[in-house]
Structures are given as structure tokens and as C-alpha cells.
Amino acid sequence: MSVLSKLITTILVALLYSFNIGRDSDRDGLAIAALFASQNVIIFGCDLDISAGKNIKAQTLSQVPDAGITVMETNPTSSQFMDVFVNACMSKPEDPGNMSKNTWDNQTDVNSKSLYLASHFVLPIIVKQANGGNMYRLADKYTPDNYERFQQKRKTQAPIKRMGTASDISRTILFLASKEAEYITGAKILVDGAFTCSTGVV
């Protein structure tokens, strides 16, 4: 944390969409919220499941007791500033050939409509700001039911020899939101332990 603590030098405002994304034991939303809160970032966490969002807030406060964090089902925040917008998407194990219409509609609502609705709210705020803002989209792929077997297989495939964690994602986003990364824009950042370049799987 000694290096990371130097990255965010001013109080920022962050909107975390799909706040509850990730597995029960390793949630991206929690890792991002806790790390940003430790940097005095004011957080608005948004999730369709408001109770799950409140649980993420409680876990964040257990790690950072003085965190400034608000949970909401949509995005009616009155904040006039928005420095960081993080939107997460998901994918289900089915493909269009065997996926039900309800599953397809739900996934489209979460991945596409939520991005539009959040952007519709965030972009006008970012455009008005002299220093602009940062927008990030996370892709959280599904994992098979047998997660332990999946973990072991991934360890053999990735050159770094371990699964990625929510902390790997949150530290990357913190760096990208910092002044040090101001010239990185419009880029696709893979945080996968070199899995993609070594296997060709995307």
C-alpha cells in the first residue's frame, strides 16, 4: 500500500456500477470499493440487488471505517462531480444456441442497458469538468460450477501460475485513475497473468 498510497493525491468521486460483481469469496466490487475508500475516494455503489450492494458497503466499512460510501439501486446521486466510473459486465455459461430468452434479456439489460443508463448520467458530468474523468468497463467471465477444478486448470495455463484476484483488478483501476496513467486512454488492458498471450484463448 505504500506505493499505491501515493497515486491518488486528491479526493475523487467514483461511481461503481454492478457493485456486487464477482464470486462470493473474491468480489471485484468489494476490492475496488475498499481500495478506493482507503484513498479517501467518495464512492457511490450501484447494483440491481440493493441488499447485496448494502452488504458490500458493510464489508467495505469493516475494512475502512471512515469510508464515504452510498449505495443505490439506480443512479440518482446529487453529486456534481464524477472522476471515476467503473462498469462491470457478466457472461452466462450458455451460448445463444441454448440460452433462454429470459437469460438473454437479463444479460443484455445488465451488460448493455446498464452501461447506457450509467453513461447517460455520468458523461454530462465528466464533459463539464475541467479535468475530465475516467471510465472503465470490467468483463467478468462466468466460471464453471466446479470452481476448484477450474482454478487448478487456470494455474497450469497462466505463466504466472495462479488465478487472478479481485485485488489484481482493483489495483489496476486505481493506477489507471491516477495522474501517473493520464496518457493511457482508449486502451484494452488485460489483467490475466499472460493467460491470453500464452494460450490464444479470449
Image (cartoon, rainbow, N blue to C red):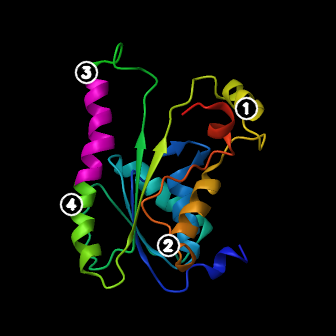
Give the quadrant of the C terminus: top right
**Residue 101 has which mark?**
3
Position of 79 with respect to 44 (left or right) is left
For disc 2, the marked residue is: 183
Question: In this picture, is 122 found above or below 95?
Answer: below
For disc 4, the marked residue is: 120
Of the image marks 1 and 4, the number of the one nearer the N terminus: 4
- At a point 77% along the width and 44% down the height, the residue shown is 160
Q: Around disc 4, counting alpha carbons within 10 Å, would you say few (fewer than 14), some (14 to 19), or many (20 or more)?
A: few
Residue 53 visible somewhere in the drawing:
yes
Amino acid type indicated by mark 3: Lys
Tag 3, which secondary structure? helix
188 and 90: which is toward the camera:
188
Amino acid type indicated by mark 4: His
Residues under labels 2 and 3: Cα distance? 42 Å
Amino acid type indicated by mark 2: Tyr
Position of 85 with respect to 194 (left or right) is left
Residues under labels 3 and 4: Cα distance? 26 Å
For disc 1, the marked residue is: 157
